[in-house]
Image (spheres, grey):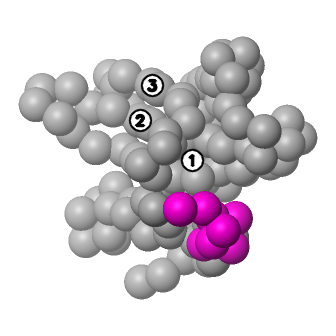
Amino acid sequence: MEIRGLPNDCPKPNMGLSSICQEIFRLVEPVLQTENLELVDVEYKKEGKQWFLRIFIDKISGVTLSDCQSVSHQIEDLIEVENLINRKYIFEVSSPGLDRPLKKERDFLRNKARFT
Protein backbone atom coordinates (compact mmCIF):
# COMPACT_ATOMS: atom_id res chain seq x y z
CA MET A 1 0.00 0.00 0.00
CA GLU A 2 1.52 3.33 -1.03
CA ILE A 3 0.29 6.54 0.47
CA ARG A 4 0.90 9.68 -1.54
CA GLY A 5 3.51 11.80 0.19
CA LEU A 6 4.18 9.29 2.96
CA PRO A 7 7.84 8.36 3.45
CA ASN A 8 8.58 4.89 2.12
CA ASP A 9 9.99 3.44 5.34
CA CYS A 10 6.97 4.04 7.57
CA PRO A 11 5.77 0.70 8.89
CA LYS A 12 3.45 -1.20 6.59
CA PRO A 13 -0.26 -1.56 7.47
CA ASN A 14 0.09 -5.16 8.67
CA MET A 15 2.45 -3.92 11.39
CA GLY A 16 -0.32 -1.76 12.89
CA LEU A 17 1.77 1.42 12.95
CA SER A 18 1.15 2.85 9.49
CA SER A 19 -1.90 4.81 10.55
CA ILE A 20 0.17 6.59 13.21
CA CYS A 21 2.81 7.55 10.62
CA GLN A 22 0.09 8.74 8.25
CA GLU A 23 -1.54 10.90 10.91
CA ILE A 24 1.78 12.33 12.07
CA PHE A 25 2.65 13.14 8.46
CA ARG A 26 -0.76 14.79 7.97
CA LEU A 27 -0.35 16.91 11.11
CA VAL A 28 3.29 17.85 10.66
CA GLU A 29 3.52 18.79 7.00
CA PRO A 30 1.37 21.99 7.20
CA VAL A 31 3.35 23.21 10.24
CA LEU A 32 6.62 22.70 8.40
CA GLN A 33 5.37 24.43 5.27
CA THR A 34 4.60 27.59 7.28
CA GLU A 35 8.21 27.49 8.51
CA ASN A 36 9.58 26.91 4.97
CA LEU A 37 10.78 23.46 5.98
CA GLU A 38 10.43 20.11 4.25
CA LEU A 39 9.24 16.94 5.97
CA VAL A 40 11.83 14.37 4.93
CA ASP A 41 10.77 11.37 7.00
CA VAL A 42 8.71 10.12 9.93
CA GLU A 43 9.83 7.16 12.02
CA TYR A 44 7.83 5.54 14.78
CA LYS A 45 9.49 2.42 16.08
CA LYS A 46 10.56 0.47 19.11
CA GLU A 47 14.24 0.23 19.94
CA GLY A 48 14.97 -1.99 22.88
CA LYS A 49 12.34 -1.17 25.50
CA GLN A 50 11.69 2.39 24.28
CA TRP A 51 9.42 3.73 21.53
CA PHE A 52 10.75 6.58 19.40
CA LEU A 53 8.95 9.11 17.23
CA ARG A 54 11.42 10.84 14.94
CA ILE A 55 10.64 13.67 12.56
CA PHE A 56 13.33 14.55 10.03
CA ILE A 57 13.21 18.05 8.53
CA ASP A 58 15.25 19.91 5.96
CA LYS A 59 15.53 23.24 4.13
CA ILE A 60 17.72 24.55 1.35
CA SER A 61 19.88 26.71 3.62
CA GLY A 62 20.23 23.91 6.17
CA VAL A 63 18.40 23.11 9.39
CA THR A 64 19.41 24.94 12.57
CA LEU A 65 18.99 23.96 16.19
CA SER A 66 16.45 26.77 16.46
CA ASP A 67 14.42 25.21 13.61
CA CYS A 68 14.37 21.87 15.41
CA GLN A 69 13.36 23.44 18.73
CA SER A 70 10.59 25.54 17.23
CA VAL A 71 9.14 22.67 15.22
CA SER A 72 9.48 20.28 18.15
CA HIS A 73 7.33 22.44 20.42
CA GLN A 74 4.66 22.97 17.78
CA ILE A 75 4.46 19.34 16.70
CA GLU A 76 4.55 17.93 20.21
CA ASP A 77 1.53 20.02 21.15
CA LEU A 78 -0.38 18.87 18.05
CA ILE A 79 0.35 15.22 18.73
CA GLU A 80 -0.80 15.57 22.34
CA VAL A 81 -4.03 17.35 21.36
CA GLU A 82 -4.81 14.68 18.74
CA ASN A 83 -3.94 11.90 21.24
CA LEU A 84 -2.40 9.79 18.47
CA ILE A 85 0.02 7.75 20.56
CA ASN A 86 -1.20 5.96 23.67
CA ARG A 87 2.17 4.85 25.05
CA LYS A 88 5.27 6.58 26.34
CA TYR A 89 7.73 7.53 23.63
CA ILE A 90 10.80 9.66 23.05
CA PHE A 91 10.22 12.48 20.57
CA GLU A 92 13.04 13.76 18.36
CA VAL A 93 13.18 16.37 15.60
CA SER A 94 16.35 16.58 13.55
CA SER A 95 17.97 17.07 10.19
CA PRO A 96 18.44 13.87 8.19
CA GLY A 97 22.19 14.54 8.11
CA LEU A 98 24.74 14.40 5.33
CA ASP A 99 24.23 10.70 4.67
CA ARG A 100 20.46 11.02 4.25
CA PRO A 101 18.83 8.53 1.92
CA LEU A 102 17.37 10.02 -1.26
CA LYS A 103 13.72 8.92 -1.18
CA LYS A 104 11.75 11.46 -3.17
CA GLU A 105 12.24 12.77 -6.68
CA ARG A 106 13.03 16.25 -5.32
CA ASP A 107 15.84 14.72 -3.21
CA PHE A 108 17.51 13.45 -6.39
CA LEU A 109 16.97 16.73 -8.22
CA ARG A 110 18.41 18.78 -5.34
CA ASN A 111 21.49 16.58 -5.08
CA LYS A 112 22.18 15.65 -8.70
CA ALA A 113 25.02 18.15 -9.06
CA ARG A 114 26.80 17.14 -5.85
CA PHE A 115 29.68 14.69 -5.73
CA THR A 116 29.04 11.37 -4.01
Q: Secondary structure at mark 1?
A: helix
Could you tell which of marks 1 and 3 lies nearer the N-terminus? Answer: 1
Task: Give the farthest residue toward the bottom.
Answer: 1
Residue found 70% across the figure and 36% down from its top? 62
Whole-percent x and y of residue 1? 42, 83
Q: What is the spatial separation of the Cα atoms under label 1 and label 2, in whole angstroms?
A: 9 Å
Residue found 54% across the figure and 29% down from its top? 93
State the image quarter where residue 57 is shown.
Answer: top right
- Marks 1 & 2, CB-CB < 8 Å contact: yes
Label 3 crowding class (10 Å Cα cut-off): few <14, some 14-19, many 20+? some
Q: 56 or 17, which is in the foreground?
A: 56
Q: Which residue is mark 3?
A: 91
Q: What is the spatial separation of the Cα atoms under label 1 and label 3, in whole angstroms?
A: 12 Å
Could you tell which of marks 1 and 2 lies nearer the N-terminus? Answer: 1
Q: Secondary structure at mark 3?
A: strand
- Marks 3 & 2, CB-CB < 8 Å contact: yes
Q: Which residue is mark 2?
A: 53
Q: Which residues lie in the magenta part?
A: 108-115
Q: Amino acid at mark 2?
A: Leu
State the image quarter where residue 107 is shown.
Answer: bottom right
Q: 79 or 101, which is in the foreground?
A: 101
Task: Give the farthest residue toward the left.
Answer: 48
Residue found 47% across the figure and 26% down from its top? 92
Q: Is residue 44 left or right of residue 36?
A: left
Label 1 crowding class (10 Å Cα cut-off): few <14, some 14-19, many 20+? many
Q: What is the spatial separation of the Cα atoms under label 3 and label 2, in whole angstroms?
A: 5 Å
Q: Amino acid at mark 1?
A: Ile
Whole-percent x and y of residue 27? 68, 46
Q: Is residue 43 left or right of residue 49?
A: right
Residue 23 appears in the figure: no
Whole-percent x and y of residue 77? 66, 22
Q: Which residue is mark 1?
A: 24
